Image (cartoon, rainbow, N blue to C red):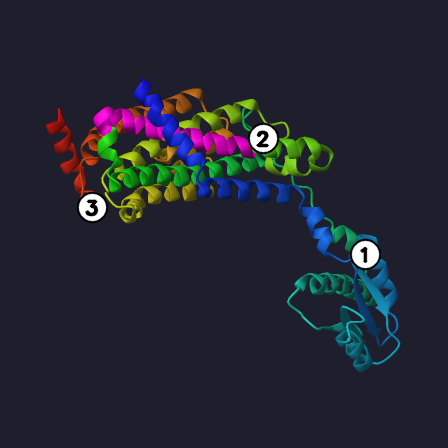
Amino acid sequence: MSKFWIILSHTYLTRVKTKSFLISTAITLLLIIGLANFQSIIGMFSDESGTEKVVVVDESGTYMEPLQESFAAIDEDIELIPFDGTVDEAQTAVQNEEYNALVAISTNADQLPEATYYANNIADSGNQMAIEQHLQQLKVVIATQQSGIDQATIADIYAPMSFETVALDESAKTQEELSQARGIVYIMLFVLYMAVIIYGQMIATDVATEKSSRVMEILISSASPVTHMFAKIAGVALVGLTQVGLVIAVAYGLIVSKQDEMTGEFFSSFGFENTSPTIFIYAIVFFILGYLLYATLAAMLGSLVSRIEDVNQLLTPMIMLIMVAFFIAMFGLGTPDATFIQITSFIPFFTPMIMFLRVGMLDIPVWEVALSIGILIGTIAVLAYIGAKVYSGGVLMYGRSGSLKDFKKAIRLSKKEK
C-alpha cells in the first residue's frame, strides 16, 4: 500500500508543478474574476455617458417629438438630436464624428413615415434595430389614427395573451423550477465534459511518457502494474480536485463579495436560488463515477502506446463517446422526458451526463437512479478488471502502436507475467 501512496504523491506533485497546470489554472481563475466583474470592465472601455448621439432630419416636422417621447419611455441609451440643416449637411457632421449616426425621416405617398439610416460603420446593428422598432410603432399609431381605429383597441389587440402552464402530475416540477434546474444542469454537464477530456488525456499522456522514457520498467519492478494504474488514476484525480477546488474557492469568494449584485440575476439565471441540495449531491456522485469510468479507460489505452504522438489516436474513440454523451445531454435539456433520453441514461458511458440531466430536470423514481448507478459501478468494476490485465501487459509493450488490436497482445503478455 505504501508503494501506491508513493506513486500517487509523485503523480500529484509532478503535475501540479508543471507550467501547463499553473497557466491553465491561472487563466481559468482570471476568466472567472473577469466574468464576475464583466459590467465594470465594459464600463472602463465605454464612454462616460454611454449615450449614442443620433441626429434626426425630420422633413415633415411632425415625427421628432413623438419619437423622442417613445425613446424616453423605454430609456434607450440613444439621444435623438433634431437637425435644422439638410441631409447632406447632417451626413457631413456624422462623417466628422460630431454624431454617431443620422436618421432622415420623410413621408411617403400614403402619408406614413419612412426613414434612411446613415452611419460611418453599420456593423453595429443594435442602434439600427432600436430606431427601426420605434419608427415602426410610430407608423402603427399614425396608420390607426388615419383609419379611425381607437388606440385603446389597438393596445388590447397587441397586449400579450394570458398563457399559463400547469403540470397535472403533483410530483412534476414547475416551469420556474425547470428553468433553475436547467442552468445548474448545464454547468455541471459542461464541467464533467471538460474534466473527463482533460484529465483522461492527462492520465494517458503520463503513462505514455513514462513508457517512452523507459521509467515504466523501473516503476513496475518495484510496484505491480495494477497498483501503478490505480495510483496514477487517483493522483490525477487529486490534481483535478485541486484545480476545481481553487476555482470553487475563488468563485465562492466573488459570490460572497458581490452577493447583492448577483442575487436575483446570476443566481436565478443559473439555478443557484432555491435549488435542492439533492441535485448537488447527485452532481458529485455522477462526477466521481464518470471520472473513474473514463479515467480507467484512458489509463488502459495509454498503456498500449510507447510514443506520446500515438496517444491522441487511441484516445479518439473515448473522446467520441464523451462528445456523443454531451450532445445527447444538450438535446435532452429541451426534452428531458423523451424516450430516447430515458433509454440512453442507462447506457454506462452516457449515464454520468444523461442520468444526471434527468435527475436535475425531472422527478424520476429512486429505483431508476439506483439502477443506473448500479450499472455504472458494475461497468467500472469490469472495466477496471479488464484494464488491469491490459495495463499489466501494455506497459511492457514497446514499438509503434496505434491500434485497438494491441488489446489481445497486452492481455497475452499479462498472462505470461503471471
Q: Image quadrant of residue 344?
A: top left
Q: Image quadrant of residue 87?
A: bottom right
Question: Which mark is first along the chain, 3 or 1?
Answer: 1
Mark carried by residue 49 = 1
**Could you say which is closer to the camera, residue 191 or residue 310?**
310
Which mark's residue is nearer the viewer, 1 or 2?
A: 2
- Does residue 409 sit above or below 38 in this rendering? above
- 283 horizontally vs 255: left or right: left
Question: What's the distance in space between the residues labelled 1 and 3, CA to CA?
Answer: 63 Å
Mark carried by residue 366 = none
Q: Which residues are magenta?
A: 220-247
Q: Position of residue 274 (x, y in %)?
A: 63, 27
Q: Give SS at disc 3.
A: loop
Decide: few, some or many residues near mark 1? Use Cα within 10 Å; few <14, some 14-19, many ≥20.
few
Residue 330 part of the magenta segment: no
The amino acid pointed to by label 3 is Ser
The amino acid pointed to by label 2 is Ala
Question: What's the distance in space between the residues labelled 3 and 2, CA to CA?
Answer: 42 Å
